[in-house]
Image (cartoon, rainbow, N blue to C red):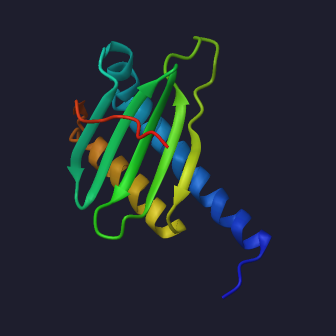
Amino acid sequence: MTFTFCMLSLDLEEIKAAIDKFEQSVYIDSGLQKYIKNTDKRGHRCKHLEQIDVLMYIIAGRVLITFTDLTSGSRITLITAQTPDPEYVIRIGIQSINATKDEVLKFLYGAIRVAEVGKLIFEPFLDAHIVPF
């Protein structure tokens, strides 16, 4: 099947809607933003999603959150500001993506479901690092 620009645009709209829900439910409501503000560690990991690894790295005033499917290797990395101004509207966006729309939606809505029951818990991950090119 050949994708058209319109089809891709519709998929991205659906992904962006899921990111917006993740931003509100996980980043703001579940306390992830507060956790980030209070930590002095750069790397963090959440192991509470089945077959999905979630890594978070804080560097240069930015927060990168990467979801990786441990079976297929598909992934998406989200990016946001570490400590936005009080007047700044939080915005999480896509940094990179190597996954289908359905895989991305599984990552994001899975995290939302786990956060809603209070089990999306990040812990410092000292082995996290930037891989040089």
Q: Position of residue 11 (x, y in %)?
A: 64, 65
Residue found 56% across the figure and 50% down from its top? 96
| 10 displayed left or right of 128 | right
Quarter of the image that includes the N terminus: bottom right
- Of all residues, the one furthest to the front in this rendering is 133
Q: Position of residue 55 (x, y in %)?
A: 33, 42
| 39 displayed left or right of 18 | left
Q: Is residue 87 above or below residue 125?
A: above
Frontmost residue, 22 versus 128: 128
Frontmost residue, 6 versus 126: 126
Frontmost residue, 78 versus 9: 78
Residue found 30% across the figure and 16% down from its top? 39
Residue found 36% across the figure and 29% down from its top? 32
| 88 displayed left or right of 78 | right
Residue found 53% across the figure and 36% down from its top? 79
Q: Position of residue 27 (x, y in %)?
A: 42, 33
Q: In terms of image quadrants, where is residue 84?
A: top right
Q: Is residue 73 above or below residue 84?
A: below
Frontmost residue, 67 versus 10: 67
Q: Position of residue 41 (x, y in %)?
A: 29, 20
- Of all residues, the one furthest to the bottom in this rendering is 1
How many numbered marks, from 0 up? 0
